[in-house]
Amino acid sequence: MTLQQLETFFWTVKLGSFAAAAERLHATQSAVSMRVRELERALCVELFDRTHRAARLTPKGRELMDYASRILDLSTELEHRIGAPEAISGVVRFGVAEVVTTTWLPRLITVIAERYPNVRLEIEEALTAELMASLHQAELELVLAPGHTRTPDLSTLSLGTVDFQWMAVPSLGLGDQTYSPHELAEYPIIGMKESSFHYAALEDWFMSEHARCRYLARCKSVAVAASMTMAGMGVSYLPVRSYRQEIEQGRLAIVNVKNPLDPVEFIAACPAGHSYSLPRAIAELAREVSDFQHIDRPDGFV
C-alpha cells in the first residue's frame, strides 16, 4: 500500500469518478483504475461495488475513506512542518472575486512564488455563487470572495471588509439628498447578475419598501458596471476603495441612502475536514497580504 494509492482512492471518492480523479491528479484514467486495483489487492478487500455504473463504496471502502483522509492530512502536515518550503510542490486551483483581482492578488501571487517556488497556481475569476459551486464540486480548492465566515461544509478565514456604496455621476442630478429604496428605484439601476454576492442583499433592500427597481443592465463585471455608471447611464453599487480616485476627480459621486448596507466581508474558503493542506497555507498567506479592513475576530479558520 502506498501514499499515491491512498491519494488516488481519496480523490476518486471525493470527485465521484475515476475520470475526475485522473484529471485532478494529472494522470490517465487507466492509471487511476490500476492504482485503486493495486490498493484493493494490497488490502485484500473490494473498495468499490462495481455492479453499478457509478463507483459506489463498499462498507470497507467507506471505512478506508476515513483513514485515507487522516493519513493524507498527516502527510501534508509532515511536509509543511518538517520539509523546506522549496520542497513543497503541486498545483493549487483557486477562484477569486473581481475586487480581489484588482487590489492585492498580484502581491499574493508574488508572496506564494517566494514562499513556495515549486507550487503552480491555476486561478479563475468569477462571481461568488459560481466560485462556491466550483468549490463544492471540487473543481477549485480555495476561494477568495465575499461570503460568510460560518458556512456549512467549508472552513473559512476572514480577509477583512470592503465598503460598497451606491454611486452615480454628478451630472445625473442626485445631489446631496438621502434616498430611500423607493426613491432610488426611480433611477436606472446598473446591477450585477444573480450569481453575484450582492444581488439578493440589494433586492431585499429595495423590497424593504416594496420597491421594484428598473434594471438598465445586469453585469458580470464590477468594472463594466462602473464604466456604464461613469458614462451617466444609471446608478450602481460599487466598492469605494476601487473608485476613490474617480470620486476625488468628480467622475463619480456617492449617493446617500437610508439604511445603507454594512461593509461586505471577504473570506478565504476551503473544503472542511483537512487540518493541513496547501490551499489552507495559501489562505493564511492571503490573510497576511489582504489590505481590506480587518475586523476583530480570531485569526484561525472557522
Image: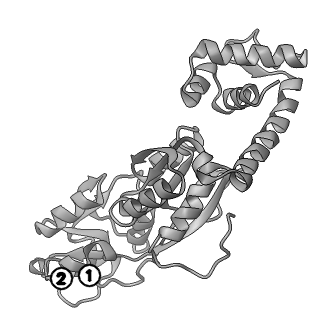
Above or below residue 71? Residue 184 is below
Where's residue 45, x and y in %? 89, 16
Marks 2/1 in contact by CB < 8 Å: the verdict is yes
Residue at position x 65%, y 27% from top? 16
Image-quadrant location for residue 19: top right
Residue ranking furthest to the bottom:
176
Above or below residue 8? Residue 180 is below
Which residue is disc 2 drawn over?
Answer: 174
Distance (Cα) linking label 2 and label 1: 7 Å
Residue at position x 42%, y 46% from top? 123
At label 2, counting other C-alpha atoms closer than 10 Å, the crowd grade (few under 14, some 14-19, many 20 or more) is: some
Above or below residue 109? Residue 139 is above
Q: Amino acid at mark 2?
A: Leu
Q: Amino acid at mark 1?
A: Val
Above or below residue 71? Residue 245 is below
Where's residue 220, x and y in %? 31, 52
Q: Which part of the image, by quadrant, shows the N terminus?
A: top right
Tell me the tag on residue 129.
none
Figure label count: 2
Residue at position x 67%, y 31% from top? 11
Where's residue 161, x and y in %? 48, 74
Which residue is disc 1 drawn over?
Answer: 255
User: Left or right: where does residue 236 sit relative to residue 211?
Assistant: left
Q: Helix, strand, or loop for circle 2?
A: loop
Going from N to C along the chain, the mark reached first, 2 or 1, is 2
At label 1, counting other C-alpha atoms closer than 10 Å, the crowd grade (few under 14, some 14-19, many 20 or more) is: many
Q: Helix, strand, or loop for circle 1?
A: loop
Image-quadrant location for residue 66: top right
Can the viewer see residue 215 in this picture? no
Q: Nearer the viewer, residue 182 or 71?
A: 71
Where's residue 255, x and y in %? 26, 81
User: Left or right: where does residue 188 sit relative to residue 265?
Assistant: left
